[in-house]
Every structure is written in structure tokens, then in C-alpha cells.
Image (cartoon, grey):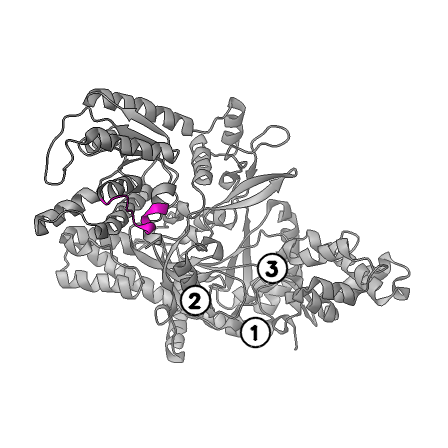
Amino acid sequence: MEERLAQRPSSCIKIVLFGPESTGKTTLASQLAEHYNTPWVKEYMREYLQEKWDEERNICQPEDLLPIAEGQMKRENELAAIAGDLLICDTDLLELKVYAEAYYNGYCPQLLLKPALNHHYDLYFLTYIDVKWTPDDLRDKPDDRIGMFERFKAALEQNNKPFVVLKGNEEERFKTAVSIIDKQLNNKKVKLSEKDTAQINKKGISVQEVEDQVEIFKRGNIKVDISEAATAGKGIFAFSDKEKEEFIKLYDSKKKELDVIKFVPASGAATRMFKALHNFVDEFDPGKEGLRSYLDRKENENLQRFFEKIDDLPFYSLAIDYARKNNENFDKLSHDERHLVIVKNILFEEGLDLGNYPKGLVPFHKYRSGLRTAFEEHLIEAADFIAVDGVANVHFTISEDHQDRFKKEFENIKERAEEKTGVKFKVSFSFQDPKTDTIAVDDNNEPFRTTEGELFFRPGGHGALIENLNNQKADLAFLKNIDNVVTEENIAEVVHYKKMLGGKLLKLQEKCFEILEKLDSGNISEDEIKEISEFLQNELFRSLEAKFDGLSSEEKIKYLKDKINRPLRVGGMVKNEGEPGGGPFLVRDENGEISLQIIEGAQIDQDNPEQVKTAREATHFNPVDLVCGLKNYKGESFDLNDYVDPKTSFIADKTKDGKPLKALERPGLWNGAMAKWNTVFVEVPVSTFNPVKSVADLLKESHQVRK
């Protein structure tokens, strides 16, 4: 019940019409909503009690209070999710509390007290009793109007709620309310100078976008509403060997007709990968403590593994060469001193300088023929399932600062990679667009300013890469992170499952296209509409909205077309064995519709025991192994920006110039940025997932070359 009475975060201004019965609240709420062209939350209690009176000739009882509260909050939360800058509320739970205590000798249900007192509204309009009393079935206190007014006023004063008393006739009240609301809306806007506006425009961002982003900070992070964990048989397909082979054959037969690309987010620096080693260099002094003592004190399993198997690093011999070159007495140093020198020569400029490399250019594997970076391994892998007519298209999103390094690396490895695979590689690069940067704010949600007084913008996170993906005009895009690669001996298994995912997408896409053409024809029966709605639910795991059955045939066709004519993704999911990554869940949106989503831990409401429990029931996690269908049934590219859920932006605490700030990350690329796609999950083996989050991961068996 507590979560059903909760007020979901919202960035809109909320105005409450508050006061005794028959004081003009509903009339004014309707007028204001029409004036500002915004939704208004109607009073659920009146409808609930009128229905009870009509059916039972019975009045409100204490046991009605919680159902009324639940109905009121359901309405408010639904409308707040779609409102723009303003939401008008004809009552709130505090009003219900006042009525409860007035009618039931001070009694109010315990579950109602906390939300009634703690819910946030920007302003209350307390309506005075100078409006003529209008009797009806429910109103019953015409002789105690002043007493009831004082109760309502006391509730606002005692709980420090901002309010204005509205008096006068209908027109006077309306003018007063509009004047006050206009000021609220004006104050809501971010205060920017001409210099600020010029800086914003130079980045290709609008002032409205900046204002919208500031409102997100004020609203706070919105937690998702998990319905249940996706599991094998319920949200995740687990196919037989025969079914897998059929999908692979389908993919191989169709691939030549398609424009296929591998899309690899690769803009990350190797900083995090080597974080523990940077800490080691800063903290370890072999003159004061031994290496074993340091490792025991840090209790870092990755660091332990690193030093236990350091000579298995693909670049170990190079690091030793640099260590000897830069330290004449290297071989005379103690064991612990040598290890400190080796680490420094791995990280810093006088050595390999890997601490300043992009992760994609760090050597991951050592073969007899030489070292291979993650970048090169992605090309070798792509040759077996991306290539069409002997050409493989591979696109990397990189940092512009690393552009020259990536291009040089490709020049160095191109000939040997093409000779080895028999495939020509068409490699392209893109950068995160500066217009996807987001404003940072201070603790008061005012724009954060640098020491030079300028606005401070930060990269919008990997979710900003939806724009880069949108610019790829391919039919299919296979998406995989730069650090998730396998050694050559294991590529065949990875390719097997890539093709399987591709085949599943093509089969599903073919069915979607067939349905959409049928819907377009207009020649469709009720039985066919029912069949299509079952496909939507059973194959795309998308529930129907509650009112679907009550729609006309024409409305059902329009609804189904909207739901099916969307970008399509098929994602491989691996059984959860403790690796990092988001998970697959069935998630309920603000309209009550349920769909498959990839959810990160930070999106889960940790204060809600039921949500936490559901999250713990997850059996699989997301390795970022996706194949995406980017065109519609007419062969046109979708505009992927139309299918982003902006409410899933994430606020994180950062620092700049030693000062704290709040940063805004755009909806994650495979999370909110694809929230409105059609999604299907398929189980794949964990052996296809080999991320390198820490340098010690390179020492795992799966990254050791044994041939």
C-alpha cells in the first residue's frame, strides 16, 4: 500500500485547490487547466463516494479512506508524468486527512499520515467560503462552513505548506490565481545572461534544452517500476539446438541482401581499467612495507590476481624491457621494488603509457604473431558474421582526442587482419556530438560555473551515442562494447550466437512487417486483430493498455500499428554469475503498460522492499550483446531519437575545480535510449561474455591464448 500512495518525482509545478466543500475548487481547477492547456487531477473521492451512494445509499466509512487515497495518487502520478510545466490538482491527501479527522473524531489511518504530510506541492489555493452553498448527495455541513475552513487553514499552517487564500467571485478568483501561477512559471526558468545564451548556442543546444535539463535536476532521479524479473520462459527465450541452427541458416541466407554493420562504443579511456594500479603507485612504499603486507591490507582480489599472475599479461615482456631501459639497476632491485617499477612502466609515458590510452588500444591478447588490441579483436570477430561480399563494415565511437591513435592503429594492422580473415575492412569512426553534452548544476540546482564564470557542460554519457547509432543507415547493427572480446580460439562460439541472434531478429522482423502491411491494407477482421494483439503480447512481451478492448476496430488498428512499427532489438542475456551489468526486467510505465527493458541497479528504488526483492529474483544479466533492426517495413530508417524515454536520465555527483556538482547523464544507450523499442531477449552462454573492467581481467583463463 505504501508504494501505491507514493508521489512519483516530477519536474512540473503542482498547484492544489484546497478547502471545504462547495467553495469552487473544481470549477477553478477546470478553468485553470483550460487556460494553461495542461492536465488537471480530478477529485477521486467525489466519484468514489457518489458511486457508493448510488449503489448502496451509504456514506463514507473509515475503511474507504485508503482506497480513496490510492485512487487519488494513481491519477496524480499518471498525469504528472505527461504534464508539461504545470499540473492542477483538485485536492490532495492532506485534504483527505482533514476530512478524516473531522468526521471520525481525530482518526486518520496511519498509512495515510506520512504521504499526506510529506507530499510536495508548490502552492495551495485555499478557497474561502464566500461562495454560495450548493447542496448535493454528499455535502452535509452547510452550518459549519467557517469551522471547516479553519480546519483546512490550520492543516496548511501547522505543516508549513505555502498557500494563498482565494476570495471573491469566480472571475476575481481566476484572475488572482492566474497572476500567481504566472509568477511561479516565470521563476521556474533558469536565469541566464546574454553571454550564457551565446555559449549555449555555440554548442548547438537550445536554451529550452538547458532549462529542461535543470528541471530534471529539480525533479530528481525517477525509479523504474519493475513488474517482475525476466526469466527463461517468461521474457527470455531459451532455444533448442535445432532452433538455433534454423536461425543461423536464416541469417546466412538473408545477410547478403542487407546492409549490416558492427557498432562498437569505444570512447572510454583505460583510466578505470588501471585504477587499482594508480592507487598502488600512489600508496605503496617498498621501504616501509612489503608487497604482501600491502595486498593483505587492501583486500582487493583483482590486485591480488594481478601480482600473482603478472607475467601472464600480454604486454608483460614489453613492460620489463621498458623497466630495464629506464632503470639501469632494475635487476638488482628487490622483488617488491621491481614490481613497483614494472607497474610504473605499464602506466606512464616513459614506458608503455597505457594509463593514458583509450581502452580499445590496450593490448588484450598475446599470440605467437604478436599482440592484439581490443580494437583488432573486434575486426577479426566481425569478419565471420558481418562481412557481405567480402567487406565488413565496423563503426567505432571514439573520443576525438584519440582519433589519430585509432587511425594509426588501423593502418598498422589492416594488412595483417585482412590477410588473416580474407575480408576487407571498412572502418569508420564518430565522436560524441557536443550538442549531446548536458549542463551541470550546484547543490541548489543552479547552473554550475567554472572559475572563469562560464557554464559547465559535461559529456552526456553513453546514452548520447544513440545519435551516433541513428546516423548509421544500415538495416542491421550488431552492438557490442569495446572491452568484450574473446581470444581467436573462442571466436567460433561467439559468431555462432551472433548469427543466431541475427536470425531471430530477421524472423521476428519479417512477421512484424507482414502484420504492418496487413494493418495498412485496412482489410482486417476482428479475429485477425485479436491474433495480432496476441503476437504483441506473446512474442514482443508488450502488454496492452487497459482500455484496448473498449476501442473501436479503427482505434485498435492504429494502436497496434504504433506499437509494432518501432525499432527492434534482440539481446543476448547470460545467466547471472556475479559479473557486472544491468539486468532484463518486465517494467511497467506510467500508463500501466508492461514491456521488456534493461535496467541498471541505480534505476531501482532501494527504499521499496518489494522492488528490491523483485530485482534480486533476476536470473540473467545484460552483457550488451545486441542486434538492432533500424529500418521500418517501408525500408525507411527510423529516427531513433523518437524512441528515447527522457525521464530515465540519471543524476550523478561529481566534482570540478575541487567543488561538488551534479551531472546529468542521458538515458543509457541500451536502457532509456532504447526504452520505446520492441525488445526480445534470448539466452546465450556466459562464455560469450568476457569484459575487461580491470587490468586483472586480462589474466583470467578466458583471455589467455593457449594455442
Mark 1: few/some/many CA within 10 Å (<14, 14-19, 20+): some
What percent of the width, then of the height, locates residue 455? 56, 32
> Which residue is identified by label 3?
375
* Mark 3 or mark 1: whose residue is earlier in sequence: 3
* Mark 1 or mark 2: whose residue is earlier in sequence: 1
Which labelled disc corresponds to residue 210? none
Label 3, secondary structure: give it: helix
Q: Say if 607 sits above or below 25 in the image.
A: below
Q: Magenta span covers which residues?
A: 104-114
Residue drawn at 75 percent across, 70 percent down: 311
User: Label 3, label 1: how many angstroms apart (C-alpha)?
Assistant: 17 Å
Mark 3: few/some/many CA within 10 Å (<14, 14-19, 20+): many
> Which residue is identified by label 2?
618
Q: Hey, which quadrant is residue 280 in on the image?
A: bottom right
Left or right placement of residue 293 versus residue 104 in this view: right
| Amino acid type of the residue tagged 2 in the rendering | Ala
Residue 278 seen in render? yes
Q: Hey, which quadrant is residue 23 in on the image?
A: top left
| Amino acid type of the residue tagged 3 in the rendering | Phe
> Which residue is identified by label 1?
490
